[in-house]
Image (cartoon, rainbow, N blue to C red):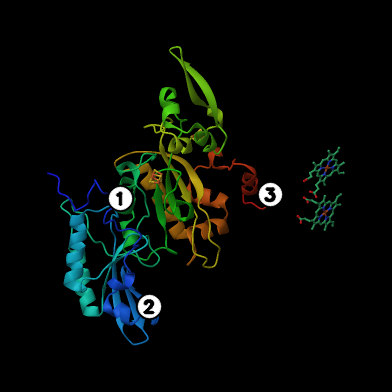
Amino acid sequence: MAFVSSGYNPDKPMENRISDIGPRDFNEFLPPVLKNNFGQWKYHDILEPGVLLHVAESGDEVYTVRCGTARLMSITLIREMCDIADAHCDGYLRFTTRNNVEFMVDSKDKCDALKKDLQSRKFDGGSFKFPVGGTGAGVSNIVHTQGWVHCHTPATDASGTVKVIMDDLFEEFTNHNMPAPVRIAVACCLNMCGACHCSDIAVVGIHRKPPLIDHEYLDNVCEIPLAIASCPTGAVRPSKVEIDGKQYKSVAIKEERCMFCGNCYTMCPSLPLSDKEGDGIALMVGGKVSNRISMPKFSKVVVAFIPNEPPRWPTLVKTIRTILDVYKADANKYERLGDWAERIGWERFFEKTGIEFTPHLIDDFRDPAYYTWRQSTQFKF
Ligand code: HEM
Ligand code: HEM
Ligand code: SF4
Ligand code: SF4
């Protein structure tokens, strides 16, 4: 398309420049019933999976219908959401912290019509556009990252892995059959953008090979001390390299000290490390952020490596399903996955799930690793 100016003048870039105005005030977008009862809510109920009722001191009611979204979406789909909001909700809607979309109405009749409309909408391929669910003790949306859609450091994809896991766990999104809510997160590299370190189940992209070094260009594109300081294990040191009789300032990597985190690549474009066969997924379980009963927990690595198998990652999907099936059958009511694993003992977690315990799972990172070993004779055979 030919260039169309927005009115911005590149010759005077600071002229008419508006800055530091911040986001719009959320009050501008509150449905009237929420505005009128703000801070005055008496109780809430989950009427059915995906449908909530909040009742205010005034007696006013709000029915909320929560629907899954793919997070990554077109303006066409956003427009369709706006049409739904216009038709049923006076033009109001909201998105949740797990990237679900919520439509709100003020009566049961409107709620039923809204739900029916939402459930009837599908993409040409057959997938639901607005599946209703994600409440209570089930599996809600997967918090995830950019993957191969946009980032330059991933070891796996995000949108792809998320779609196949949610397809497999769709029943759990639309029901409340779990002992407690199960939070799943995906991060495509160890930067762990998002919630992987604190989720019941976490999918994290990992590498298994050290970076390649582009000696010829490294000094031109990298701040060498930054690359050295980026390494958590001190594997990177400065070095001089001779190529075709020409001296280059570069770095050397001690491969037996490198654990393939990719941090040095983040700092230095001349240290790429992604690799088709080498890259894959580590699976972590048992994290949580709430302080209900037990304190918040980090998730722990239980499967060191699952290969990337695009487009449907069958091994990954099967492993997650196995863990959730055992948790569902064995955990007590209200027990999050981490609460359950800690109560029965991690040796029992591995026994019950049939997941192989490998030396990779034993912490070996600095002094704190010691505290993850067992300094007790308390264990089960
Ligand atoms: C040259 C001889 C010895 C050396 C170099 C030695 C060294 C040590 C060291 C380094 C520790 C660990 C301390 C810590 O945890 O910080 C220790 C603990 C211990 N040693 Fe020795 N030791 C010696 C002789 C003995 C003997 C002869 C006995 C008993 C008759 C003994 C009984 C113990 C006990 C029971 C502990 C554990 C103490 C505790 O954790 O409360 N050691 N020893
Ligand atoms: C009926 C006899 C005994 C009782 C009830 C007893 C009880 C205890 C208890 C409660 C502890 C603390 C354990 C802990 O907090 O982890 C302990 C530690 C210890 N006891 Fe005894 N004890 C007895 C006999 C003995 C004898 C005969 C010895 C040595 C010849 C001994 C050596 C030790 C040592 C070295 C420790 C420190 C171990 C460590 O810190 O790992 N105890 N004992
Ligand atoms: S987790 Fe890593 S690869 Fe994924 S978006 Fe964040 S930085 Fe990029
Ligand atoms: S990948 Fe990580 S461990 Fe390996 S050299 Fe780079 S920063 Fe160090």
Residue at (46%, 31%) from the top-left corner? 209
* Amino acid on which disc 3 is placed: Gln
Q: Residue furthest left?
A: 2
Residue to which mark 2 is pinned:
44
Residue to which mark 1 is pinned:
163
How far apart, in angstroms, are the residues tagged by discs 3 and 1?
41 Å
Q: Nearer the viewer, mark 3 or mark 1?
A: 1
In this rendering, does residue 374 appear at all?
yes
Q: Nearer the viewer, mark 2 or mark 3?
A: 2
Is residue 354 rendered to the left or right of residue 32? right
Q: Residues within 10 Å of mark 2 (few under 14, many from 20)?
A: some
The quadrant in which residue 131 appears is bottom left
Is residue 323 rendered to the left or right of residue 26? right
* Amino acid on which disc 1 is placed: Lys
Looking at the picture, how far across and down is residue 290, in whole percent?
A: 49, 64
Ligand 3 is in which quadrant of the figure? top left
* Amino acid on which disc 2 is placed: His
Residue to which mark 3 is pinned:
375
Residue at (30%, 81%) from the top-left corner? 61
Q: Residues within 10 Å of mark 1 (few under 14, many from 20)?
A: some
Q: Secondary structure at mark 2?
A: strand
Labels 2 and 3: the sequence-earlier one: 2
